[in-house]
Each structure stands twice: as structure tokens, then as C-alpha cells.
Image: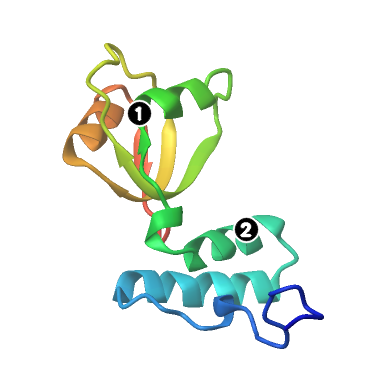
Amino acid sequence: DLKAGGRRTGHKSSMRVVKTKNPYNRLLIKLYKFLSRRTDSKFCATVLKRLHMSKVNQPPIGLNRLAKYMTNKDGKTAVIVGKVTDDVRMLECPKMSVCALGFTESARKRIEAAGGECLTFDQ
């Protein structure tokens, strides 16, 4: 312990074991583990890393912040490993394509009413 400066040495990362009990998340992790192994896509590896994160590290994102990130990105799809929530302070929702783990009902309605689309990871 003294040589390691208080850090644990020789232990493996917790990313190797799926801790979630959610069957949907477990299937997504299995799918993206396969995809990141078979392809050299950094995107699949990043999504897999985010899916392995704890619930605390998958915070929800509001429509206001999402709209700010998606300005001048027509034809692109925003990928969020977390939930998309509605923001009542935003008066108009722009048209955008969003892929996320989940949506609140009001956020889904506002995105689809603006002509955008709401996707989940298995679509």
C-alpha cells in the first residue's frame, strides 16, 4: 500500500462485469460489446464505455442544452446515453434527430411535433 500511494494495485476494472439488473441495458451492453469487438469503430467503444457507467454518471439532459449543442448540425443525430427531459423554459423546440436511452413523454412530444425523430439504441 505504501508503495502504491494508497491506490489498489492488481485489481481489474469494474467495466468487465455488468452490474445493472435492467435487462434492456444488459442487452445493449451485449450488442455494443459485440460491435466494438468486430468493428474498429471508436463510436461503438465510446457508447459501450458510457453504457457501463453507473446511473449517477448517466445524467439526464434537458431539451434546452440539447438544442444548443445541435445548432448548425443539420442531418446529424445526437446520441445520449441517458434520458432526455423537457425544458418548459424553451419556447420553441428545433427539428432534431435524437438517440437516447429514454425520453420523458413531454420531451418526445415536443421533438416529434417539431418534425424531429426520437430513436432508441436498438433502432
Residue 30 % position (x, y): 49, 78
Mark 2 crowdedness (10 Å alpha carbons): few <14, some 14-19, many ≥20: few
Q: How many marks?
A: 2
Q: Nearer the viewer, residue 110 or 50?
A: 50
* Residue at the (22%, 42%) spot, across then down: 104
Q: Residue at x 34, y 41 (%)?
A: 118
Quadrant in which the N terminus appears: bottom right
**Residue farthest top in this picture:** 91
Rendering coords of residue 88 (x, y %): 22, 20
Which of 1/57 is in front?
A: 1
Q: Residue at x 53, y 26 (%)?
A: 69
Q: Is residue 107 left or right of residue 59?
A: left
Q: Please provide percent x and percent y for residue 115.
A: 33, 25
Q: Residue furthest left?
A: 105
Numbered tag placed on residue 53 in the rendering:
none
Q: Does the residue at mark 1 contact the one at mark 2 (Cβ under 8 Å)?
A: no
Q: Secondary structure at mark 1?
A: helix
Q: Earlier in the sequence, mark 1 or mark 2?
A: 2
In this rendering, is residue 14 above or below 77?
A: below
Examine the image and state in which quarter residue 2 appears.
Answer: bottom right
Where does the image place residue 87, in percent across and percent down from the top left? 27, 25
Taking 24 as reference, is 74 left or right?
A: right
Image quadrant in which you'd find residue 117:
top left
Q: Is residue 70 visible?
A: no
Which residue is disc 1 drawn over?
A: 63
Identify the residue under disc 2: 46
Is residue 22 rendered to the left or right of residue 61? left
Mark 2: amino acid:
Thr
**Left or right of 6: which side holds 117?**
left
